[in-house]
Amino acid sequence: MHEALIKLSLIKNFSRGKVRDIYDLGDQLLIVTSDRI
């Protein structure tokens, strides 16, 4: 399994959880989820 680290410095972090990050894109939200096994 490979891992990737991407720094999103221009995007404001709206919420951070255990398996979910939500970013504020202005009029939209970007939701990034992971499955931690």
Image (spheres, rainbow, N blue to C red):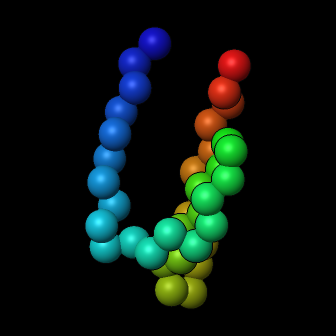
In this rendering, the answer to whether 36 lies above or below 19 is above
Q: Residue furthest bottom?
A: 27
Residue 4 position within the rendered picture, expressed as x and y whole percent measured from the top left: 36, 33
In this rendering, the answer to whether 35 lies above or below 8 is above
Residue 14 position within the rendered picture, expressed as x and y whole percent measured from the top left: 58, 73
In this rendering, the answer to whether 21 lies above or below 19 is below
**Residue placed most toward the observer, 5 or 29:** 5
Instruction: Place residue 12 in its image quadrant.
Output: bottom left
Residue in the image at 34% along x and 39% along y: 5
Residue 19 position within the rendered picture, expressed as x and y whole percent measured from the top left: 67, 42
**Residue placed most toward the observer, 31 or 16:** 16
Residue in the image at 30% along x and 54% along y: 7
Quarter of the rendering occupied by the C terminus: top right
- Residue 15 lies left or right of residue 13; in this view the side is right
Q: How many marks?
A: 0
Residue 9 position within the rendered picture, expressed as x and y whole percent measured from the top left: 30, 67
Residue in the image at 32% along x and 47% along y: 6
Residue 31 is at least partly visible in this image? no
Residue in the image at 50% along x and 69% along y: 13
Residue 8 is at least partly visible in this image? yes
